[in-house]
Amino acid sequence: MKSIVIRQPREVVFEENPMPKPGEGEALLKILYGGICGSDLGSYRGTFAYFDYPRIPGHEFSAEIVEVPENSYGLKKGMIVTCNPYFNCKTCYSCERGLVNCCTTNQTMGCQRDGAFSEYITMPLERIYDGKGLPPKILAVIEPFCISYHGVSRAKINPGERVLVIGAGTIGVLAAVAAKAKGAQVYLADVAEGKLRYARENFSIDGTILNTSEEAFQKEISDITDGKGFDVTIEAVGLPSTFQNCIDAVAFGGKVVVIGVGKKNLDFNFTLIQKKELNIFGSRNALKKDFIELIDLVSAGTVNLDKIITNIYPLKDAPKAFAEFDRNAGTMLKVLIDFTA
């Protein structure tokens, strides 16, 4: 079978690998669609913190069950599914407390272990979730939606609160969608005007902020909130400057959620945390309940994820997909690879 491999920064190739054989408690899956996420793009660029070369990328995907043993999960051959790609050790202090998403030795597919960008993979049964009739393209977007949804859930957003999401990539837009679903008034900030326009036109965002300079950003925040600041700010980029934006834009007594992943340090006046009495939440990965809740939410028609997918490439063009996403990240949101084409 064919696998996509990032050998080193900006080098994506195909490799032939033997068909995987499912072990005890595992199913054999045929990959249908795979999403290139921000961390995959960072891995391609050599900027992602949790990646070693060479590696098969990919942790956003939909698949068809090819082989599955008798099980209590309701999984059957031919079922279209998605999966939880975060492997936890089950024995560390986090896992003991049920915080499996932040296992101290977490291994996410496509990051610390090989990912899903092969024609066939095996997965433990407990990590496989019935897609409940959702189209395979949409199922491949459930995992990034879970990342955003988990972060938004950390803030316990109340209806009517003002929320600012910084970063209009896939995770940021989906965080805005999740916050809107909780009844918030949501604004989205970015340096890419095209992405902001697309989000405003397709996702019912209440407003956008083009982050052209620190002065312009601060004026927009003051104008929108009458000088009060946002109740919740969400960092979905992974840069020191965007974390600082979140600290500056949040109200006294507000909440900051950090979803973005970066490799750079920030030197800032940490007394602002004390002065504003801020609540700062890290958000890593997602939980099974996030997957189940979002599959149900999307299946019910409450949220439409079609517009988050802006580009689809056939499997043979996977290297092109990475290269073009790298060059055009300011205009692309979710990029999918069609493993059936």
Image (tube, grey):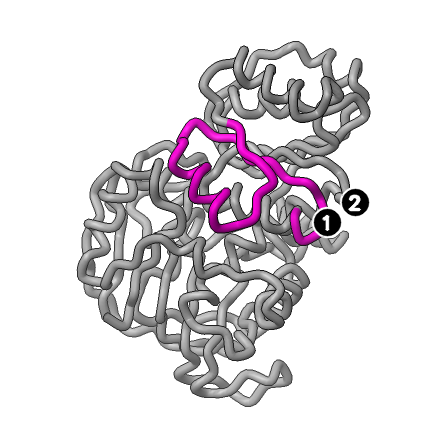
Q: Which residues are magenta?
A: 180-209
Up/down of 64 relative to 90, above or below: below
At label 1, the amino acid type is Gly
Helix, strand or loop at disc 2?
A: loop
Residue 26: in magenta span: no
Q: Do the residues bearing badges 2 and 1 touch, measured as CB atoms within 8 Å? A: yes
Kindly report the distance in space between the C-alpha atoms of the residues bearing marks 2 and 1. 7 Å
Q: Quadrant of the N terminus?
A: bottom left
Quick one: SS at disc 1?
loop
Residue 158: mark in rendering: 2
Kind of residue at disc 2: Asn
Residue 89: image location, x then y, percent? 60, 55
From the image, which quarter does the C terminus lie in? bottom left
Name above or below for residue 93 compared with residue 272.
below
Where residue 184 sits in the image (x, y, percent)? 71, 44
In the image, taking residue 206 as reference, residue 170 lies left or right, namely left
Vertically, is 140 above or below 102? below
The residue shown at (55%, 83%) is: 75
